Image: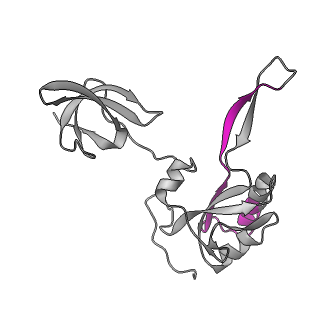
Amino acid sequence: MTDEVRTHYGDDTPLDARWYVVHTYSGYENKVKEDLEKTIENRNLQDLILEVKYPTEQVTELKEGSKKPKTVLRKVYPGYVMVKMVMNDNTWYIVRNTRGVTGFVGSSSNDPTPLTDEEVYAMGVEKKEIIVNFAVGDTVRIVDGPLSSFTGTVDSIDVDNNSVNVVVSMFGRETTVEFELDQVEVVSQ
């Protein structure tokens, strides 16, 4: 790939910036992240290598012999770092030759495979921002799935789990059905 003129999203994210998975030596995830961020800043590559992260989760551990549980951050994917970048020869070289990096994940280390949008959201690398413009009691139309074009009343909303329960009339009976937040839209009054 070469450095060509790129089109941007409204938020100045290049269209060809994708998430890639980089394999590191075990325990070097934070060091690789810090070194890459320093290189990005020193070489002014913020428009080509946008973000470096390794997903973590908060876990409560109870060790043998200890009476108090301890909350710690644990790496979700040990030995891997996620990099959102525009792939070209220069950025590939910079990431690949960072101390602690053993290669990109893909069919070959020279031809990295970007994550799909579904993989990015499923792995928790990025969160989809969904604006909820309806409330409990509102009438909504189902816009996706087998009940597409049905209407119903919002029974409950769980933003954290990306779900909404809608009471739909099917075969003359009121039935509560769970949908993802982006599967329904408010019916204009």
Residue farthest to the top, as pictured: 67
Query: In this image, 57 relative to 165: left or right?
Result: right
Percent coordinates x, y for residue 150 in the rendering: 18, 38
User: Residue 126 in magenta?
Assistant: no
Q: Nearer the viewer, residue 174 or 11?
A: 174
Vertical arrangement, residue 67 with respect to residue 50, above or below: above
| In this rendering, position of residue 105 left or right of residue 167 | right
Res 49 → quadrant: bottom right
> Horizontal placement of 99 versus 187: left or right?
right
Residue at the (85%, 24%) spot, across then down: 64
In the picture, the quarter occupied by the N terminus is bottom right
The x, y position of residue 60, in whole percent, is 72, 28
**Where is residue 76, by image quadrant?**
top right
Q: Residue furthest right?
A: 65
Residue 42 in the magenta stretch? The answer is yes
Image side of residue 115 versus residue 66, left or right: left
Tell me which residue sits at (26%, 40%) in the image.
185
The C terminus is located in which quarter? top left
Q: Please name the colour scheme applied to the rendered image.
A: one colour
Residue 81 vs 88, above or below: the answer is above
Q: Which span of residues is magenta-colored?
A: 36-63
Q: Where is residue 19? Give x, y as percent.
A: 57, 61
* Residue beneath the point at 71% across and 65% down: 40
Residue projecting furthest to the left: 172
Question: Residue 72: image x %, image y %?
Answer: 75, 33
Q: Quadrant of residue 139?
A: top left
